[in-house]
Amino acid sequence: MPAFLFSGNQSLTGTAAELFRVYVFTDKQCLNPVLTGTVTGAPAFSPRPYGTLSMPTLPTSLQQSRSRYLGDQQPHAATTSDFGYDGALLALSEQAKAATPTTTIPTTPGDTGSAAPGSGSSGSSGSSGGSGGAAPSGGLSFSGDPGAPINLWDTDWPNAGYYWTVIPVGAVQPGALSTFVRSPGAKVNDTAVPVAGTAGFNVGDTVTIGTETVTITGIGDGTISVTALKQAHGEGQLVDRIGGDVRYIDMELPQDACAAGRISRFGKSSEPSLTSSGDLFATGLSPLGRLTSAVHTAAFYGSPLVSWTPALGAEAYQVQWSKAKYPFVPEDDPRSKTKGFLTTGTSSVLPLGKLPGPWWYRVRGLDYSLPSGAQQMSWSDPAKVVVTTPKFKIASGAGSKRKFKLVP
């Protein structure tokens, strides 16, 4: 995922700002967002997978925050005080729920079969994320937190790409706001108060109900959830907001900024794994029985060991093989009956020992920082290996006794 650099500090109306937010869209009109950034006071932004900056929530802490480094918020925080220019609550990408790691064979477009849950190669299963291990069915297992899915998919650059813009953000302190308790009112120890209107109120606001001061913990349909009441409150009693958390509100719409030309385009293209670089990355027995690499032989007896270069950002790899380079039709793994297998390593044995002939294999990474169900990276170029039968030579002995010996 790239970092974003920008300059300037004024909105379209000329209002100066000291906070900013990056948006990424799939279209030039900036209608379909794929990343909504958190607030930053720097002229640069890079999404964080394990918690955003802990922005000040109290008005008294705003000034102090300008002269110190902010700490980290808890990962996947469920609450936010970020709002769009239209007043809509923003779903920040860095606070999203962690993606589900791909631990079974993902379905490839065009495949007629599908992988069974937990399927994979028993010979290539591995662990990821520290304490993970091989699943009983032969797939991968994963433990730990892969972080928020803050990465983006590859694009067919330059034919396709993403569009991004920067929006100035204001730190707004909530103003005065009033409503009334409606029937049937609320009793002592109640945590929900029926009110005439909830528009403008937010979680964290401090309100007075009669002579009692409480904090709003939730907003419902015609009710506000508050800390436990110590007094009873009847219909018509005044509800006044006297304070609340600082809110970070966009100072303009992203669509207006994009239409005004404050927009830039970029593409994303992950480097695929290399299965060969001039010479094949394969090792095995030659037809004459010697252990050799593809540099010295064009064919192998039995199952060859193939390897590949790591793909940047990949947590695991999917390996497939086919009888033809094009169209590449993946064959079933004879051990698990799935289209290839998964592994966390960068080498594995292709199960082709009893299947002589030319074969093509390919590898792609799986990036767990992408959204669930769509973590596949680019395929490598198919590489060719030839599996052949062994060659024997019969040697005759002297006299009537014959001795046979296998020689290289």
Image (spheres, rainbow, N blue to C red):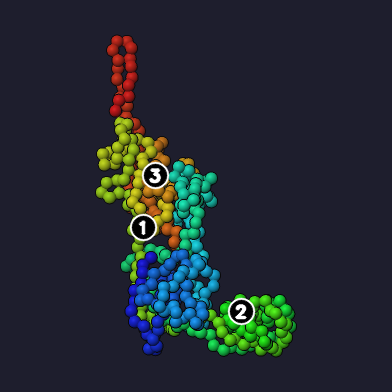
Q: Is residue 391 left or right of residue 106?
A: left
Identify the image quadrant of residue 206. Answer: bottom right
- Mark earlier in primary sequence (2, 3): 2
Question: Where is residue 171 drawn, in percent x and y?
Answer: 46, 82
Q: Say which residue appears at 36% left-offset and 67% top-offset.
A: 2
Label 2 – label 3 distance at C-alpha: 57 Å
- Label 2: how many residues lie within 10 Å, few (<14), some (14-19) or many (20+)? many
Work out whether residue 33 can be spotted: no
| Marks 1 and 3, how far apart at CA | 19 Å
Q: Which residue is mark 1?
A: 312
- Residues at circles 2 and 1 in contact by the CB criterion of under 8 Å: no
Q: What residue appears at the point 32 percent right and 10 percent down from the top-left corner?
A: 400
As drawn, the label of residue 348 is 3
Q: Tell me the distance, in whole angstroms, between the alpha carbons under discs 2 and 1.
A: 45 Å
Q: Is residue 201 above or below residue 76?
A: below
Q: Is residue 183 above or below residue 38?
A: below
Residue to which mark 2 is pinned: 216
